[in-house]
Amino acid sequence: MNILVTGGAGYIGSHTCLELLEAGNRVIVLDNLSNSSPEGLHRVEELTGKKVEFHEVDLLDVKAVQNVFTSCPDIDAVIHFAGLKAVGESVEQPQRYYENNITGTLNLSRAMAEHNVKNIVFSSSATVYGDPATVPILEDFPLSCTNPYGRTKLMVEDILSDLHVADPEWNVVLLRYFNPVGAHKSGRIGEDPSGIPNNLMPYISQVAVGRSEE
């Protein structure tokens, strides 16, 4: 398959690209590199011996997004990781999060529809469950977001679900997961945020390698 991965240069995205390539898929990456680096993709290519087609594009740039689909007319499916993801920052900058995460997805879905690409896997989040009454969380627990970041994830879930209702040819998968940790077994790719880490494990890793103080 020919698969477009938005946010493919990031932590989860780069690992996904590696697995897709090793499974024999063609991978096209769209990423604005706001919280990542091309180095991760270079290492994916090094590990797999295969080429990643990279487009440095922001999903808010409608024309640039359209150009990706025009230049790659045989895309079969999209895995959508791209988006701002810091809970605390979303509370301080809600408009930025709503614009980036929701408008970006609308631009992506319009381009997909115009090019008859109707298969999408969306990287949602367990934050859509808010503060659950009990743990572990089950998939059918009530949804109750407590911050703008979580609300953008749930809104995008609703947008994509509505696309399927309006046109059953849309195949939509919503993945609600917690923060993954760790690195590839080669040690060549892992979580290496370009800004302030949003989770505990990147802090621990940076202290361990001497990049940050204890």
Image (cartoon, rainbow, N blue to C red):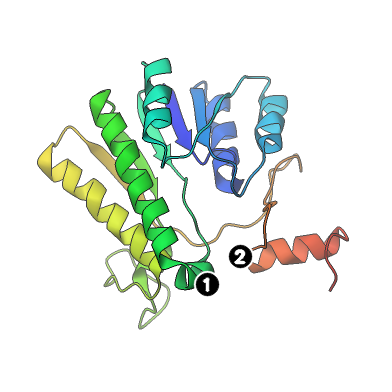
- The answer to whether residue 108 is visible is yes
Which of the 4 image quadrants contains residue 36? top right
Distance in Å between CA atoms under marks 1 and 2: 9 Å
Q: Nearer the viewer, mark 1 or mark 2?
A: 1
Q: Which residue is mark 1?
A: 88
Crowdedness of circle 2 by 10 Å Cα count: few (<14), some, many (20+)?
some
Disc marking residue 213: none
First reached walking from the N terminus: tag 1 or tag 2: 1
Residue 135 screen position, x and y as percent: 42, 77
Q: Is residue 74 left or right of residue 165?
A: right
* Residue occupying the far bottom of the picture: 133
Q: What residue is shown at x 62% (from left), y 66% (from top)?
A: 199
Q: Along the line of sight, which residue is nearer the eye, 34 or 166?
A: 34
| Tag 1: amino acid | Gly
Q: What residue is shown at x 73% (from left), y 66% (from top)?
A: 203
Residue 61 screen position, x and y as percent: 42, 37
Q: Which residue is mark 2?
A: 198
Q: Quadrant of the N terminus?
A: top left
Residue 122 screen position, x and y as percent: 37, 46
Disc 2, SS: loop
Disc 1, SS: helix
As drawn, 192 above or below 87: above
Residue 165 screen position, x and y as percent: 12, 45
Do the residues bearing badges 1 and 2 touch, measured as CB atoms within 8 Å?
Answer: yes
Q: What residue is shown at x 29% (from left), y 27% (from top)?
A: 117
- The answer to whether residue 72 is visible is no
Q: Is residue 66 left or right of residue 8?
A: left
| Tag 2: amino acid | Asn
Crowdedness of circle 1 by 10 Å Cα count: few (<14), some, many (20+)?
few
Which of the 4 image quadrants contains residue 47? top right
Q: Along the line of sight, which residue is nearer the eye, 187 or 80?
A: 80
